[in-house]
Image (tube, rainbow, N blue to C red):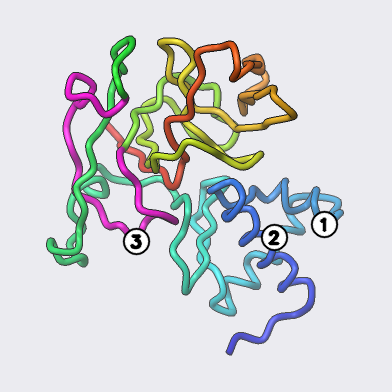
């Protein structure tokens, strides 16, 4: 059994809660802010200690590259090579799952309609916190500050409801967007993670609005 200090246990619980509630591990800055550290460097030192004790795995160079060991990660660090989007050598082919890739969504069509499908990928289901139903090609930079970039492949589980703070795929009229979800009373706000973009406010009772799914992981292809 891993022996942790009280502070390390607190940080580990914070990471677990963030993954459970939003689908993504926290950034160093978010950990520092939550626990009252003066800088993100203090959070980094605690994370390194947790890694040395085998509680987590850190991927360098990514703001949310934190993986809980002994549990499946909700949002793994982006793949570093195109091969990471195909069958992984260490995973038997029989254990891989095939996910359709959704490109640009045709106006008025269901998101999984044939005309929206670009291709499919065989991926290891252990990469995700929950079994995804499809991959969505991200367009634009509205979620840049949490590491979701233009061209990334977002793993999405079909749902029709979400908790505040979770990253969702939503349809507004004929547009499909990736945003952070927040609902207050009957009003839904879709929050960008980039100050250059505005909050989208919708009234589910009157606007053409639907949740298409919940983000459960992220893959990145380098070209």
| Residue appearing at x 68%, y 31% in the figure | 183
Q: Using the image, determine if residue 173 lies above or below residue 45.
A: above
Determine whether the residue tagged by mark 3 lies in a helix, strand or loop. helix
Of circles 2 and 1, the one toward us is: 2
Residue 101: percent from left, percent from top: 25, 33
- Residue placed under numbered mark 2 in the picture: 14
Gap between marks 3 and 2 measured at Cα:
22 Å
Q: Using the image, determine if residue 173 lies above or below residue 188.
A: above
Determine whether the residue tagged by mark 1 lies in a helix, strand or loop. helix
Q: Is residue 131 magenta?
A: yes
Q: Using the image, determine if residue 109 lies above or below residue 169.
A: above
Q: Are discs 2 and 1 less than 8 Å apart at CB?
A: yes
Determine whether the residue tagged by mark 2 lies in a helix, strand or loop. helix
- Residue placed under numbered mark 3 in the picture: 126
| Residue appearing at x 44%, y 56% in the figure | 129
- The residue nearer to you, when weighing 195 against 177, is 177
- Residue placed under numbered mark 1 in the picture: 35
Q: Residue 96: which quarter of the image?
A: bottom left
Judge from the rendering whether residue 184 lies leftward or rightward of residue 74; answer left or right. Answer: right
| Residue appearing at x 55%, y 28% in the figure | 179
Judge from the rendering whether residue 120 lies leftward or rightward of residue 152; answer left or right. Answer: left
Question: First in sequence: mark 2 or mark 1?
Answer: 2
Question: First in sequence: mark 3 or mark 1?
Answer: 1
Res 182 label: none
- The residue nearer to you, when weighing 223 against 9, is 9
Span highlighted in magenta in the image: 111-134
Res 196 visible: no
């Amino acid at each position: 059994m891993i022996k942790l200090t009280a502070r390390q246990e607190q940080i580990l619980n914070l990471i677990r809660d963030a993954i459970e509630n939003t689908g993504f591990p926290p950034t160093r800055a978010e950990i520092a802010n939550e626990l009252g550290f003066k800088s993100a460097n203090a959070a980094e030192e605690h994370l390194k200690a947790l890694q040395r004790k085998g509680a987590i795995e850190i991927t360098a160079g990514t703001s949310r590259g934190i993986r809980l060991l002994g549990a499946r990660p909700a949002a793994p660090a982006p793949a570093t090579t195109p091969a990471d989007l195909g069958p992984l050598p260490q995973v038997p082919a029989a254990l891989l799952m095939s996910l359709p890739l959704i490109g640009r969504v045709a106006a008025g069509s269901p998101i999984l309609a044939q005309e929206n499908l670009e291709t499919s990928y065989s991926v290891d289901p252990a990469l995700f916190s929950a079994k995804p139903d499809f991959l969505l090609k991200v367009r634009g930079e509205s979620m840049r500050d949490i590491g979701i970039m233009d061209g990334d492949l977002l793993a999405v589980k079909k749902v029709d409801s979400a908790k505040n703070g979770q990253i969702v795929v939503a349809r507004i009229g004929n547009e499909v967007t990736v945003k952070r979800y927040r609902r207050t009373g009957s009003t839904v706000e879709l929050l960008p993670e980039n100050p250059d973009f505005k909050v989208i406010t919708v009234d589910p009772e009157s606007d053409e609005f639907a949740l298409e799914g919940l983000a459960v992981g992220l893959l990145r292809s380098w070209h």
